[in-house]
Image (cartoon, rainbow, N blue to C red):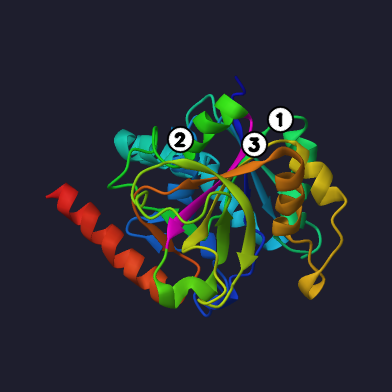
Amino acid sequence: MKNITHAVIPVAGFGTRMLPLSKSVPKELLPLGNRPAIHYVVEEAIAAGIKHIVLVGHAQKSAIENYFDINAELDNQLRHKGKDELADSLNWLPDDVTLSMIRQGKPLGLGHAVLAARPIIGAHDFAVLLPDVVLDPFTTDMSADNLAFMIDAFAKDSHSQILVEKVADEDVHKYGIAKLSDGEIDDKIDINASFKVAGFVEKPSLAEAPSRLAVVGRYVFSNHIFDYLANTKASVGGEIQLTDAIDALISEYGVNVTTMRGDSYDAGDMRSYMQAFIYFAEQQLASSE
C-alpha cells in the first residue's frame, strides 16, 4: 500500500479577484471566522495524514510562512502574562509535521507551480490542495472524508484521485467538468465514492458538458505527474496547465474522480468569500456559547 505523506499547496497567486483586500495581505491569510483561510486547508491536510507540506509561493508571500512559524517574542510575552493556553493555540502545528516553502519563480500557471515543488517532494506520491477552496470542517470528518478518502483510495489501486462535486446547471460553464468512463452518476451526490474518469472538459456550455461533476481543488497524484508536467508545453496564456498533464496521466495510468462529501467554499471569490466568512463565524460563535 502506498501511503501519502506529502502535500503541495500553491500560494503564489496575487488574488486579483479579492482586491482591494488582497493588495497588502495575501488572500490565503484573509479570515474565515477567527482563522485565516489557509489555516483550515493545512488542518485538513494534517487530519488526512499529511506530514510534510510544501507551500509554493513567491517573495511577497512570506507572511504565510511566518503565520505557521513560531513568533518567539510574542510567545514569550503571552507566557509571561500567564496566557499559556493562548500561546499554545498559536503554535498548533504538530511536532511531526514539517512545513516548507519554495518559490515558483515565474507565474507560469498551476501546472508549473506544482512542478516547482518537485525538489522537495522528490520521488514521493503526493496530494495537492488549492488554498482558494476551503471544505466545510463543521459537517465532515477530515480524518476520514474527502482528502483522507482519496488517499485511502489511492493506496488501494494506485490511481490518482481528483475530487469533484455536483454543481447546478447554471454553474457548469465555470468549472472543469469530468467525463466519466461509465456515464453520469446521479445517486452519489453527498458521499465519497471513486469512479474512473475518461477526461475533463474545461468550462463547457451546459449542452456540451459530459456531466455535472466539477473539479473542486483536491488531488492525489502519482509521482508520474511530475514527468508529464516537465514535458508539458505552455498553452493558454503562456501557462503550463495541470489539466494537460492529467490528460496524459489518464491515458497512461488511469485516474479516478472522488465525489465530495459536504460543502466547499471559494475563498478566492469576493461574493463566495463573504458568504463563507459569515458561515464560519456563525459556526464558531455557536460553539462558543
**SS under mark 3:** strand
Could one spot residue 4 in this view of the protein? no
| Frontmost residue, 250 versus 100 | 250
Nearer to us of marks 2 and 3 is: 2
Which residue shows up at 33% across the image and 34% down it? 84
Residue 19 screen position, x and y as percent: 53, 79
Q: CA distance from mark 1 to mark 2?
A: 19 Å
Q: Magenta segment, which residues?
A: 158-166
Labels 1 & 2 near each other (Cβ < 8 A) = no
Q: Which residue is mark 1?
A: 124
Which residue shows up at 54% across the image and 77% down it? 17
Residue 96 screen position, x and y as percent: 54, 24
Q: Which residue is mark 3?
A: 126
Magenta region includes residue 15: no
- Residue type pointed to by label 2: Phe
| Frontmost residue, 4 versus 98 | 4
